[in-house]
Image (spheres, grey):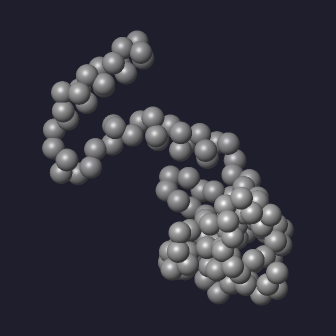
Amino acid sequence: MDELVRIDKWLWAVRLFKTRTLATEECKKGRVTIDGMAVKPSRVPKIGEVIKVRKSPVTYSYKVVDLIGKRVGAKLVGLYVLDITPPEELHILEVRKQMGFFERDKGAGRPTKKDRRDLERLQEYDD
């Protein structure tokens, strides 16, 4: 076990980010916080700290169980990190998935006939 490991490397090792570069960029943008303060990529996490990672629209919370500097398989991630994200945050994500087609990309054009029918079907359930 590595005693001193950078937070960007730890985030990558426990598979919270696909690449270490992405983890570094998210730290620099202020989307990774510990105790409400944005952290630099070089910060060393401590066992027991709660790290919050903001991935729009949800802020995930993770507790550091152990430090690791090398990427591990998905089955072993539980030995190093504990997901303590509140259910309210996960509910936001579920609602966004269900309401996904209401958000249209700018320049996507008019809704199709299928989109209109889906929207009418949803409105019937609301009545």
Whether residue 36 is visible? no
Above or below, 39 against 83 in this view is below
Q: Quadrant of residue 61?
A: bottom right
Q: Residue at x 55, y 78 (%)?
A: 20
Whether residue 69 is visible? yes
Q: Where is residue 78 in the image (x, y as percent from the top left)?
A: 76, 59
- Quadrant location of the C terminus in the rendered image: top left
Q: Tell me: 4 left or right of 94.
A: right
Q: Position of residue 55 (x, y in %)?
A: 53, 59
Q: Position of residue 126 (x, y in %)?
A: 42, 17
- Quadrant location of the N terminus in the rendered image: bottom right
Above or below, 127 against 32 in this view is above
Above or below, 54 against 39 in this view is above
Q: Residue at x 23, y 27 (%)?
A: 114
Q: Which residue is drawn at 29% across and 20% down?
A: 120
Q: How many labels does the image show?
A: 0
Q: Where is residue 30 in the image (x, y as percent from the top left)?
A: 55, 73
Q: Which residue lies furthest to the left in this view?
A: 109
Q: In which quarter of the image is residue 48?
A: bottom right
Q: Tell me: 124 left or right of 7.
A: left
Q: Tell me: 34 left or right of 29.
A: right
